[in-house]
Image: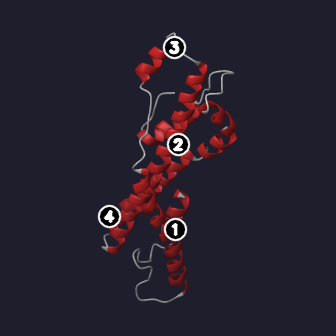
């Protein structure tokens, strides 16, 4: 969705963000701009509806210290370990997705507001922020849905507490999610 949002704005740069009309003209580009804004507006409205619901979700993550201690204790269980890894992977994917939507929405709002106020410097900075945010989202999250889809059976077994064939490892996927959510580089 990030790419759609970014290119939707790119296609309608000369279109008023709020009402979707082009100032002083009624040419084909104006009609195209209004259609783009209407399609684009649907996604922005959808984000407005998703965020309040998502904001009520409580994420649960195990502390690194507790995990390291538990890993070497008598209470350690491969089934429980795999359940923790699967749960945290899904929680991080959800958190990253919501973060991506919220960032896109805020950058889009800033870009449109700057356009409406005819503040070119602010518009350029906001638009650049939107494009960089879209790039970060694609770079970090592009493979997450496909990875979760390909491993859905394994994840389901882990979540049900039925996976004891070996310890699940999801370091690469977790690293991408952590990098995106924390907006920083984590050591490999």
> Residue 38 in the image: x percent, y percent?
50, 75
Q: Which mark is residue 122?
A: 4
Helix or strand or loop: what does disc 2 sit on? helix
> Residue 179 in the image: x percent, y percent?
47, 38
The quadrant in which residue 13 appears is bottom left
Q: Nearer the viewer, mark 2 or mark 3?
A: 3
**Of callouts 4 and 3, which one flags the residue occurring earlier in the amino acid sequence?**
3
> Residue 41 in the image: x percent, y percent?
47, 70
Q: Nearer the viewer, mark 2 or mark 4?
A: 2
Question: Crowding at label 1, few (<14), some or many (≥20) Cα neighbours within 10 Å?
Answer: some
Question: Crowding at label 3, few (<14), some or many (≥20) Cα neighbours within 10 Å?
Answer: few
Between 63 and 185, the one lying in front of the other is 63
Residue at x 44% of width, y 83% of height: 22
**Quick one: quadrant of the N terminus?**
bottom right
Residue at x 60% of width, y 26% of height: 169
Circle 1/circle 3 CB separation < 8 Å: no
Q: Nearer the viewer, mark 1 or mark 3?
A: 3
Q: Which mark is residue 75?
A: 3
Q: CA distance from mark 4 to mark 3?
A: 56 Å
Q: Which residue corresponds to mark 1? A: 8
Q: CA distance from mark 2 to mark 4?
A: 32 Å
Q: CA distance from mark 1 to mark 3?
A: 53 Å
**Of callouts 2 and 4, which one flags the residue occurring earlier in the amino acid sequence?**
2
């Amino acid at each position: 969705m990030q790419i759609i949002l970014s290119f939707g704005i790119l296609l309608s740069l000369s279109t008023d963000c709020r009402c979707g009309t082009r100032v002083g003209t009624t040419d084909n580009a104006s009609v195209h701009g209004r259609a783009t804004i209407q399609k684009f507006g649907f996604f922005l409205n959808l984000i407005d509806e998703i965020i309040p619901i998502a904001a009520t979700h409580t994420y649960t993550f195990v502390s690194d210290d507790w995990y390291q201690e538990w890993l070497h204790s008598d209470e350690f269980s491969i089934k429980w370990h795999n359940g923790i890894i699967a749960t945290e992977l899904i929680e991080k994917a959800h958190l990253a997705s919501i973060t991506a939507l919220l960032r896109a929405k805020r950058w889009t709002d800033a870009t449109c507001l700057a356009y409406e106020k005819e503040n070119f410097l602010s518009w350029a900075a906001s638009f650049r922020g939107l494009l960089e945010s879209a790039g970060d989202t694609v770079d970090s999250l592009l493979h997450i849905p496909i990875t979760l889809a390909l491993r859905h059976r394994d994840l389901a077994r882990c979540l049900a507490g039925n996976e004891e064939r070996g310890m699940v490892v999801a370091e690469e996927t977790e690293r991408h999610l952590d990098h995106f959510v924390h907006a920083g580089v984590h050591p490999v």
